Image (tube, rainbow, N blue to C red):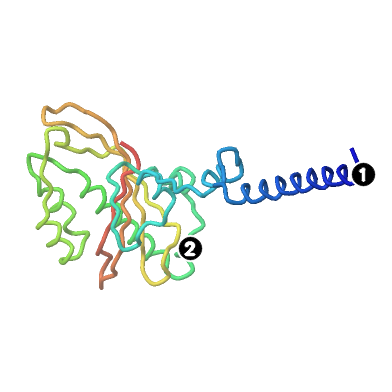
Amino acid sequence: MGEKAKNIIVYSVMVIIITLFLVSIFVGKTMPEDTSNDVSKVNTTSNQPVRAYKGRTEETKGTTTDPNVIQENHEQQEIETPDPDTLKEPKSFYRKYFSDEQIKQSKKVAKQFATNYYAFNGDRPTQHIKNARAYMTDKMYQKLVEKTPKPTATIYKKQIVSAEVYEPYEPSKEYFVWKVRITGDIYNSKGKKTKQEIVNYTLKMKQTEETFQVRNYMLNVLHH
């Protein structure tokens, strides 16, 4: 084979190789992209944030209660109060602003009101109010008479066991406020003692020309 024939064969092979290479590149660009093995694109969706919904009780837990909504708790409240046994000779706040006689009279009236008013009797539902009549203002008396409590089968009668009077935590220098803690026994409609309770009366006093009277009160049940 001559030299010229050899050169023609070599050139022909080179042309074929180049042509095949170009064809392969063209075909690769025109074929649809296969994403079946593309891990990063498959996981893109799983990396998106997911909205998690909670139940209403969990969602609102710890949130601030609307201050305009009234909340009522009818369960017994354990309220810390001074032990009357340690307050027989208290360092009186009232001595800075009132005379000893005023303190003595107002304190006596507070105790008389609380002990008379507490002693409820289902046979005579208004008697305890009448018994405390002399120790309260006319306005307060009318309010109590209009809202006379009714006896129940479980709470039919109350009897005083003990009563102690002491100053409140934040007394006023303009008028007397006394705390009266009463321990009392409760009886049912059959006359059987069912339980003992401890209550606190917070009494706001009003001075008259001759003495003092209770003009308002608040009751807290400490134990029953």
Query: Which residue is denoted by mark 2 in the rendering?
Result: 93
Query: Dot 1 lies on which element?
Result: helix
Q: Is residue 208 above or below residue 40?
A: below
Q: Is residue 129 left or right of residue 184?
A: left
Q: Residue furthest left?
A: 123
Q: Quadrant of the N terminus?
A: top right
Q: Is residue 193 left or right of residue 182?
A: left
Instruction: Name the quadrant containing residue 16.
Output: top right
Marker disc for residue 31:
none
Disc 1 to disc 2, C-alpha distance: 133 Å
> Crowding near pointer 1: few (<14 within 10 Å), some, many (20+)?
few
Which residue is more in the foreground, 34 or 160? Answer: 34
Instruction: Name the quadrant containing residue 57.
Output: top left
Residue type for callout 2: Phe
Locate residue 171, reporting x and y percent: 42, 63
Which residue is more in the foreground, 187 or 212? Answer: 187
Residue type for callout 1: Glu
Which residue is more in the foreground, 177 or 72? Answer: 72
Which residue is rendered at x = 48% and y = 60% of the image?
Answer: 92
- Give the mark toward the camera: 1 or 2: 1
Locate residue 117, reporting x and y percent: 20, 50
Query: Which residue is denoted by mark 1 in the rendering?
Result: 3
> Crowding near pointer 2: few (<14 within 10 Å), some, many (20+)?
some
Which residue is rendered at x = 15% and y = 48% of the image?
Answer: 128
Which residue is rendered at x = 87% and y = 42% of the image?
Answer: 6
Which residue is rendered at x = 67% and y = 46% of the image?
Answer: 24
Locate residue 174, reporting x and y percent: 39, 72
Instruction: Name the quadrant containing residue 189.
Output: top left
Q: Is residue 30 left or right of residue 89?
A: right
User: Can residue 87 be seen by looking at this rendering?
Assistant: yes
Q: Quadrant of the C terminus?
A: top left
